[in-house]
Amino acid sequence: MTGDHARLGEALLDVRGLTKIFGTLRACDGVDLAISKGEIHALLGENGAGKSTLVKMLFGSLEPNAGEILWRGKPVRITSPNAARQLGIGMVFQHFSLFEALTAAENIALSLASDTPISTIAAKAQALSHSYGLPLDPYSLVGDLSVGERQRIEIIRCLLQTPDLIILDEPTSVLTPQEADRLFETLERLRGEGKSILYISHRLEEVKRMCDRATVLRHGKVVGHCDPQQETAASLARMMVGSEVHEIVREPAKGADTAAVLLEVDHLDRAPATPFSIPLRDVSLSVRAGEVIGIAGVAGNGQGEFFEAISGEVTQARAGAIRIRGEDVGLMDISGRRQKGAAFVPEERLGHGAAPEMTLSENLLLSRHATDRTVFLGNLGTVQTGALATAARRINEVMDVRKSAENPAASALSGGNLQKFIIGRELDRKPVVMIVNQPTWGVDAGAAAHIRQALIELARAGSAVLVISQDLDELFEVSDAIAVMHNGELSKPIPIADATFEKIGLLMGGAEPGHVPHDERMEVA
Amino acid sequence: MRVELVRRPQQSVLFSALSPFIAFALMVIAGAIIFLALGKNPVLGLYAYFVQPLTEIWSLHELAIKAAPLILIAVGLCVCFLSNNWNIGAEGQFTIGAITGAALPLYFPDMHNVALLPLMLAFGAAGGALYAAIPALLKARFNTNEILTSLMLVYVAQLVLDWLVRGPWRDPAAMSFPQAPAFHSWAVLPELLPASGRANWGIVFALVAAFAVWFMLARTLKGFEVKVVGQSPRAGAFGGFSTARTIVFAFLVSGALAGLAGITEVSGAIGRLQPQISPGYGFAAIIVAFLGRLNPLGIIAAGFVLALSYLGGEAAQIEIGVTDKTVRAFQGMLLFFVLACDTLIHYRVRLVRPAPTTAAKPLATEAAHGHR
Amino acid sequence: MGIAEAILLTIATAATPLLLAAIGELVVERSGVLNLGVEGMMLMGAVAGFGMALTTGQPWLGILAGALAGTLFSLLFGFLALTLVTNQVATGLALTLLGIGLSGMIGEAFVGQPGVKLGALDIPVLSDLPLVGRLLFGQDPMFYISLLLTGGVMWFLFRTRAGLTLRSVGDSHSSAHALGIKVVAIRYLAVMFGGACAGLAGAQLSLVYTTQWIENMTAGRGWIALALVVFASWRPWRVLAGAYLFGAITIAQLHIQATNLSDLATWPAPLYWLAELVKSIPSQFLSALPYLATVVVLVLISRNRRLTMMNTPASLGRPFVPDR
């Protein structure tokens, strides 16, 4: 380590032994990190490895328990985001720190300490956004903007503070491949201007492509510094995960073209439920026994609305809009659709798929009280806690759910383990139709592989599986065909053999073949 | 120096059990301070408040009389609060229940048989439930804020009662006194042990209701529905439970129990309708519900505590000459302490000094220990 | 002074406490905090104001004491809801229940005592102007204070950076925290402002509106003020309109109750019949009008879901625990 420090004598930022403890968890444990001027430095690690905790300490939102931060060679205490900004550290958050009810310009003004009038800020923001090719209307309400546009606000807001170090937390996880390319151009230009960038990602390809050096975190500890160009994606993955990740096995679906259609969506329309939600327009889709269909799309293009409609949390006006095993279920609620053999896993685990304060066995009852009435309920509607406990134990064993107590509250589990439980809860029923929204979002690699494999196996055993995801890698791993949802409309599924990142990415950006891509339209406007 | 809350991974079982007692102890301390401030002997004051009413048999009967409506209402409120429905109009539902129940003997003065009393109780419960259905339906249908509508309806209910006892239902024999005629014996709720005191069947209804609702909440799917919809409405919808249905259910249950409390009170303890029929039971029951930690069995105990405060206020007025207005102040403080103590169930509370400059502390473990 | 002028003057006096309390609560809610303790804070303000004015003979000291009592009382709520992160609905209710109890206890000594009145201003010349003279220049000082506060809040919320910061905290406390905005401190200030306004509203009741202390004298005005904030969809000028609407309803029903039919004998027949009809309504139902109107208004406004969703501060009532 000492050699490292000597070599990087002129480091812009030098972090030594930074430690953060939450309760008993060492989220960051003696982390060393050095970033020099004009480099793009990758911070790699799985979900829960401590990346976000580390950058929050660098940005002053979290207070380290131990360790030291050197900025331009001098020890500093970064006590608040304001202090960080004054030093010259800017941040683009993963879960945007934006205010939906305010305009873009007001959002930007909030992180500028000066009392510059909003109109001046708006003009500056617009000028800057044009010079970087990131078009932006400063007077639009953030709530009305797409995810990509929101990220632009974050980036412009950060750049207006003229930082020397820019921290980007998982910036491409919400972008189309084409939007991501745009971002990379911007970042390379910033590097050319002598700025340093700390780039957090778990996407190895983009790290290899762009970053000068990388620091890898696992379980809160630095497990290595390396030059990504010298590594392969596989070797980087090994460093991140600490062991070989099981390859997903996906045999091609046999005889899928002739198998029965188990799930059918027929010209589904849905008016927007809230001022900020997306209407669904004429969505049609069918999933046959034995196949996995993936639905790609940038966040906020109607996937949540689609999931609610298909699950029956919101019922349809027309019975035939959704069919399960050939039966019209459009008027049925979610319990009715479950009783027809369907199972659902929503995007949000805590507060949607599971009630946070309730125990695992109570959460088991949540989605299965209608389908397994005879097992879990007595005559007077009394809950059979013994039967629930047995079933919960079975699920935890099959899915390898790791937990600290026999029957803990859902919120006490890590994201990956809770997701394994929620998926296992549905698989345990052997559903005929399974609809999953974001199956492995925020889940560590081992658990993600387990979940993906389980979904494929369910399909190969004769069920129809629909996977909605923003993670293209995941969709290419599990799907037999991929359709794209954009602005409430669904494209035709593209068989996996014909699908490429570029093709799917263009559709995600809103381009019909032969049409102008979304981003360029924006610029014309 | 700042207060820092650290969320516990699991709710603390210890503090779940202890928090009502800590809250009560804090209220006793605060009460002593108030007595001192009023220039009274705090020991005598607290004795009069919390011990003296327990020393005589007739007084225990009075305790049961006061506890009955508090428990009945609070048990219903706990269904509402658990399902995240803020019914604070129980006082109004209580009043309407008293009116609808009392209407029977007034309109059928010749009905002198055993069916009358059960019918009155049923009418009272139905009246309370229907009155609670107003804020419930408005919330379920239009998303109207139930806190404000249910509370506004309290004032309306009290004015309706006032109009009835001064107008159409006024007892002509009572001169210009604003009150309805006294109930005849078939319409009066019988006393339990007439030899030793006034306590009536109301306390039995309260205990039965508490056990029934406890069973529903703890052991049945309906109870699960109430809790899951209250904690996490989206998860509830995912489970197939309709939020609207739960709103209506919770309000109907709590309105019915408040209405039952109302008719029980006028038919038992009071004996007729009059402009004032409640010393704020509907609001005190909110405190009972929280002091009982929204558990019907806990509510039984909490109901007796609040009933004691009513009796204690009277006793303290007689014994040491403090105003009985202290009662509501004590009750309000109790709720404050209960809520503050509930924080201990969900969080560890720490006082934190801003960390010293960490530059000289490369050893992580050392610093971490210094912090705890 | 004509009868219409007198009615308008009383409407202003009835609307002022609603406006004061509601404009304070509006700021609190804009910062993302729901304080249901308005009724309790008003009562504390009323009793403190009355007591101070009675003992010193200075109505202005009473007004100050009212504001101070409201502020201190709101800090109780702040400590629980903001520092200990208790449920805001329950804590607000607790504040109201405690306020009713404490004010009743403190005010026991004041019952039946004649109070001190904060008199109307009488600006020479201007208040003698025809028609608008008394209405604009001859009212009690609280009338002007309430209007100044409303204008000030409008300016603060939408024209200053501090107001923008407060609104941002109400929209997303986690985003604000991530940017380094001191969420809890800002909310404390907002809660204290709300407490001061409620205290002023209470003092207006016991020093201007009626000059006496009656237990529970707010009679639900704190709750109506809360409803007004919702009705106004969190916009100051609509709070102003709503407060005067409710002031008008209150005064109208009082006037109907107080009017004798015999005084109207000279009215033309159809109008007289109408008056006769209105007078046949029992007084209790007239008294219930403001409460019923509140329910109706809440239903009307909540039916427009889009409007409510667009305007409700997104973090309203949500607990916030800053991580450090």
Image (tube, coloured by chain):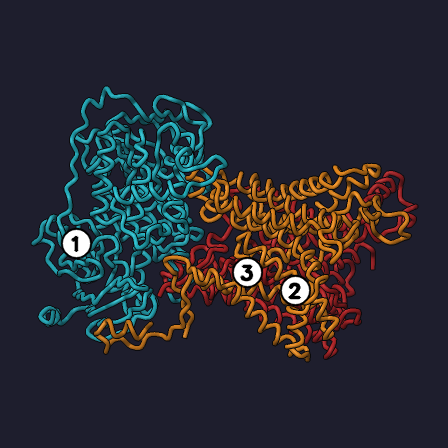
Q: Secondary structure at mark 3?
A: helix
Residue C38 percent location from the top left of the image: 61, 61
Residue at horizontal 21 percent and vertical 74 percent from the top? B362
Residue at horizontal 48 percent and vertical 64 percent from the top? B18
Residue C169 percent location from the top left of the image: 45, 59
The disc labelled 2 sits on which kind of residue? Ser
Q: Secondary structure at mark 1?
A: helix
The disc labelled 1 sits on which kind of residue? Met
The disc labelled 3 sits on which kind of residue? Thr
Could you tell me if the residues under marks 1 and 2 are in contact, i.e. CB atoms within 8 Å? Answer: no
Q: CA distance from mark 1 to mark 2?
A: 63 Å
Q: Colour of chain B?
A: orange
Residue A421 percent location from the top left of the image: 31, 44
Q: Which mark is residue B309?
A: 2
**As drawn, C180 above or below B227:** below
**What is the residue that sits farthest to the front in this orientation?**
B195
Left or right position of A431 against B80: left
Residue tagged 3? C91
Q: Nearer the viewer, mark 1 or mark 2?
A: 2
Q: Nearer the viewer, residue C219 or C162?
A: C219
Q: Nearer the viewer, residue B198 or A398?
A: B198
Q: Colour of chain C?
A: red
User: Are the residues under badges 1 and 3 in a single subunit?
Assistant: no
